[in-house]
Image: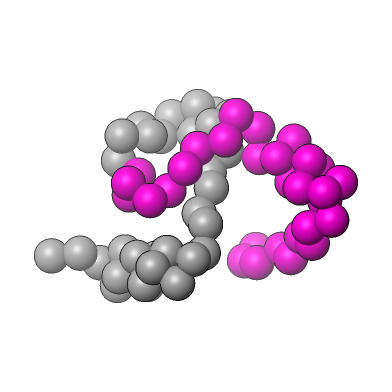
Amino acid sequence: ESSLFEKIIRSLGNKGVNFLVCENTLRREKLDPARLLNLIRPVPAGIAHIIKRQSEGWSYIKAGF
């Protein structure tokens, strides 16, 4: 059975929301990327990805802590 979070993430993914995770953070926290849901895509460096997107006109909204 999937968790509530998995159901929410899958539902948002079906609506076109992209989920990205920082590979640097995965390594630092010793997290196994194989455990990620298949719709979550790793990027080499999260901050670099954000900066690149902002330079393309995207907006960054921090969510969470």
- Residue toward you, 53 or 36: 53
Quadrant where the N terminus is found in the figure: bottom left
Q: Is residue 28 shown above or below 22?
A: above
Tell me if 43 is positioned left or right of 56 in this view.
left
- Residue toward you, 49 or 57: 57
Q: Can residue 18 be seen in this view?
A: yes
Q: Is residue 3 magenta?
A: no
- Residue toward you, 56 or 50: 56
Q: Measuring from the top left, give residue 12's x and y in whole percent.
A: 44, 70
Q: Which residue occupies 33% across, 49% down?
A: 37
Tell me if 35 is positioned left or right of 52 in this view.
left
Q: Is residue 25 visible?
A: no
Q: Measuring from the top left, give residue 64's x and y in whole percent.
A: 62, 66
Q: Is residue 44 magenta?
A: yes
Q: Which residue occupies 74% across, 65% down?
A: 61
Tell me if 16 is positioned left or right of 5 in this view.
right
Quadrant where the C terminus is found in the figure: bottom right
Tell me which corner region of the image, top left, top right, bottom left or bottom right, holds residue 57.
Answer: bottom right
Q: Is residue 61 shown above or below 48?
A: below
Tell me which corner region of the image, top left, top right, bottom left or bottom right, holds residue 49.
Answer: top right
Q: Measuring from the top left, give residue 17's x and y in whole percent.
A: 51, 64
Q: Measuring from the top left, give residue 38's x and y in whole percent.
A: 32, 46
Q: Which residue occupies 34% across, 65% down?
A: 10
**In the rendered structure, which segment of residues is drawn in magenta?**
36-65
Q: Which residue occupies 76% across, 47% down?
A: 53
